[in-house]
Amino acid sequence: MTVPVFYTATMTAEIQLKQHYHERISAVLRYIHGHIDQPLDRERLAQVAGFSIPHLHRVFVAHTGESVASYVRRVRLERAGRKLRMGAVDITEVALAAEYASHAAFGKAFKQYFGLSPSEFRQLSCNEATQLLVEKRKCCED
């Protein structure tokens, strides 16, 4: 049985487009992780991808299952959790490093994500905190 040329060409083009999108989103993810401690704006991320802002949003959600803003927020909160687990003393410093304008805003987002306040999280044993971080990571990868 022969496959029609049009079908084969269409499938090849779709595969190439998916590969191109994967490469562009990988570049955005690398940029995010390399600049996570700095303000990240949609315009710059779209520029890194070579997409318009709305197109970046659509492709990013299709590839990661979450919006750019949600992804950045999650990565920053997980990083903050690691800092607290490693003994960061000043929660306000951790909040500012995570790009939160205030201790209160950080505390609310942290508790919403981890189910514990930053102070409660910091009081966990290192193993308990690590386990919680691993569970959150697995939850987001599924």
Image (spheres, helix red, strand yellow):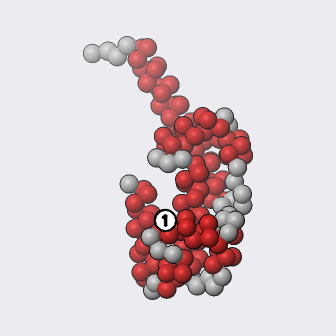
Identify the secondary structure beneath mark 1.
helix
Considering only vertical position in the picture, is 80 above or below 19? below
Q: Is residue 96 left or right of residue 112?
A: right
* Residue at 68% in and 45% down: 42
* Residue at 66% in and 65% down: 100
Asked whether the viewer can see residue 3, the reply is yes
Residue carrying label 1: 112
Q: Nearer the viewer, residue 89 or 109?
A: 109
Considering only vertical position in the picture, is 36 above or below 19? below
Q: Position of residue 112 (x, y in %)?
A: 49, 65
Q: Position of residue 16 (x, y in %)?
A: 52, 31
Considering only vertical position in the picture, is 29 above or below 61? below
Q: Is residue 49 left or right of residue 4?
A: right
Amino acid type indicated by mark 1: Gln
Question: Quick one: label 1, few (<14), some, or many (20+) residues within 10 Å?
Answer: few
The quarter of the rendered structure image containing the C terminus is bottom left
**Tally of marks:** 1
Q: Position of residue 56 (x, y in %)?
A: 60, 39
Q: Nearer the viewer, residue 124 or 32?
A: 124
Q: Is residue 113 left or right of residue 35?
A: left
- Residue extending farthest to the left is 1
Specify the quadrant of the image occupied by residue 39: bottom right
Specify the quadrant of the image occupied by residue 48: top right
